[in-house]
Amino acid sequence: MRAPAARRSYRQYCAIAYGLDFIGERWALLIVRELLLGPKRFKDLFEALPGIASNLLTQRLRDLELAGVVERAVLPPPAGIAVYKLTSLGEELEPVVRAISRWGSHFVTREPRKDESIPPNAYMFALRSTFRPEEAAGLARTFEVQLGERVFGVHIEEGRCTTWEGLPDNPDISITTDVRTFSGLLWHRLKPRQSLARGKLVISGDPADLDLFVRVFTHRLSAGPGQT
């Protein structure tokens, strides 16, 4: 692991400062967020992070590699493609990113603006933070969620939740929708059965499992800063 360049260091003998020296640069944690759902090609990361320049993505990936957070690998056959993935050190950032997601939810108190992108991966990772194990007690379910052209798997069992990008095996229900509708469901702005009736989403499976999904993963609403 190489220390960050002197110009980027806080120069404080402090664990928080040291951590930010390595992952505090703009876009760094969003790259980690993407890779927490599985290995990605450079092209996949670039498309998942609208607004980042390709040369900046290259630099951030290089920085994260030098920090020992990210590494390059080749997926086994039949894929055989070069990807970026998290190291074991990088995977230790999951609870950190989940905590930031929970804290940041206090500020997400309105509809997304038209000029704001809604990255599907962000929502699929956020499910790990909004998961309510008490609502899923004794349940075992696998969900396939298709948001636009992206497909994800969600599995709950024994009060635990796993999410990843890619097709799940034998899902109990498949949910196909757009990311804005998905956002509305998770933030209580839309009701699942009404969205289904209005054609905003399509399911394959028991509609009761759609209700279960929303109940288990809906954000807990709380007043944001300056609100009552």
Image (cartoon, rainbow, N blue to C red):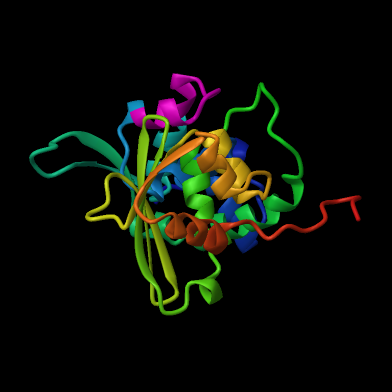
Say which of 42 and 215 sits in front.
215
- Residue 24 in sight from this viewpoint: no
Q: In the displayed structure, does residue 143 sit left or right of residue 33?
A: left
Q: Residue at x 54, y 59 (%)?
A: 217
Say which of 40 and 182 sits in front.
182
Q: Residue at x 41, y 79 (%)?
A: 138
Q: Residue at x 57, y 60 (%)?
A: 130
Residue 76: quadrant of the picture: top left
Q: Quadrant of the C terminus?
A: bottom right
Say which of 214 and 33 sits in front.
214
Q: Is residue 108 magenta?
A: no
Say which of 67 and 80 sits in front.
80
Residue at the farthest front position = 197
The image shows residue 145 at horizontal and vertical percentages of 39, 45
What range is drawn magenta here? 44-58
The image shows residue 215 at horizontal and vertical percentages of 56, 62
Q: Residue at x 51, y 73 (%)?
A: 133
Residue at the farthest left position = 77
Q: Is residue 9 above or below residue 162?
A: above
